[in-house]
Amino acid sequence: MARVNKNSYVWDFATGSGGLLVAGMNLMLQDAKTSINSPDELRQKENQIKAEQILGIEVLPEIYMLAVLNMILMGDGSSNILQENSLTNFNGKYGYGKENQNFPADVFLLNPPYSAQGNGMIFVEKALNMMHKGYASIIIQDSAGSGKAKEFNQRILQKHTLLASIKMPNDLFIGKSSVQTAIYVFKIGEPHEAKFPVKFIDFQNDGYKRSNRKKAKASSNLQNIDHAEERYEELVDLVKFGSGSLKLFGQNEYVEDTIALEGDKFGADWNFAQHKKIDAKPTLADFKKTVSDYLAWEVAQLLAKEDDKSGK
């Protein structure tokens, strides 16, 4: 969704244990393997990706160490994992290797602390305003898009475009958090236009069944029960290409609609539920059920009258 490739420069302003950066790095390395034939060039590109094209920031020392270890275990990429406050101290420059140069980020990935201002949208505004181009994909508590972060969202839309809003499964973080989350996808550096059709997607059915059995194997806690891999692939295609990619998703799970750029809803109408189309036109099945219910009621009334007569 964030258009990651071998030439991307990816950063995360609330890195945590580094999961999003690892995923981004793996996509970059995979793209390099499929597009570079020369072994020497591939090796050089892989080293560049790990040393120069990934940057993460984590303020908590113990979590920072986890992120560094995680990156090392996953093939490194730990060179520019920085321990500092991304909101107050970070100046946009490399931490190591190119200390005096700005990190040319064109992909922003984020799962912020929801307790931060605007449910975490303060991180989004800071990062996007330090970028000149590219895309951002953030997963955040969906109340950030329905009013809790209006001021941040309004300022973001003045400089950047909201491409898509995705309603995620409510058990996505089962065992860790019970909040409802959404993914917001942005295009950097282009102010949002009033007539721009945002893609709203209901992804509550992502094909996985989750459980929280602590002693069970990871494979038991996450089971593919309904074409999960295909659903995630289709989700990416919907964000990038629109309704022509609809296959597994139903028509009621995908909506294209505009968002407000003024008034009370400005910055507070970013979620699927606020744009879901409700068809109030009765169907043939609705008509048949209504007639059936009415006839059943009539029969019940007649039987009740007969019972009253026989009881007199």
Image (spheres, rainbow, N blue to C red):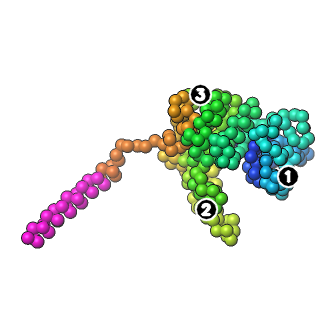
Task: Classify residue 110 by image quadrant.
Answer: top right
Per the image, label 2 sits on a secondary structure element best described as strand
Could you give the CA–CA distance between mark 2 and mark 1, rounded to whole angstroms? 30 Å
Q: Are marks 2 and 3 in contact (CB under 8 Å)?
A: no
Q: Few, some or many C-alpha atoms within 10 Å of disc 1 (few <14, some 14-19, many ≥20)?
A: some
**Left or right: 252 as drawn, with respect to 128:** left
Q: Which numbered disc flags the more N-terminal residue, 2 or 3?
A: 3
Q: Which residue is mark 2?
A: 210
Residues shaded magenta: 289-312
Can residue 206 be seen by looking at this rendering? no
Could you give the CA–CA distance between mark 3 and mark 1, rounded to whole angstroms? 40 Å
Image point (76%, 48%), residue name: 15
- Spot occupied by residue 80 in the image (x, y as percentages of width and height): 85, 45
Q: Which residue is mark 3?
A: 193
**Amino acid under label 1?**
Asp
Task: Classify residue 196 by image quadrant.
Answer: top right
Q: Which residue is mark 1?
A: 76
**Amino acid under label 3?**
Glu
- Spot occupied by residue 16 in the image (x, y as percentages of width and height): 75, 51
* Picture layout, residue 123 above or below residue 214: above
**Amino acid under label 2?**
Arg
Q: Few, some or many C-alpha atoms within 10 Å of disc 2 (few <14, some 14-19, many ≥20)?
A: some
Q: Which numbered disc flags the more N-terminal residue, 3 or 1?
A: 1
Per the image, label 1 sits on a secondary structure element best described as loop
Q: Which numbered disc flags the more N-terminal residue, 2 or 1?
A: 1
**Left or right: 129 as drawn, with respect to 263:** right
Residue that protrudes farthest toward the left in the picture: 312
- Magenta: main secondary structure equals helix
Residue 236 magenta-highlighted: no
Could you give the CA–CA distance between mark 2 and mark 3, rounded to whole angstroms? 39 Å
Depth check: 292 or 64 in front? 64
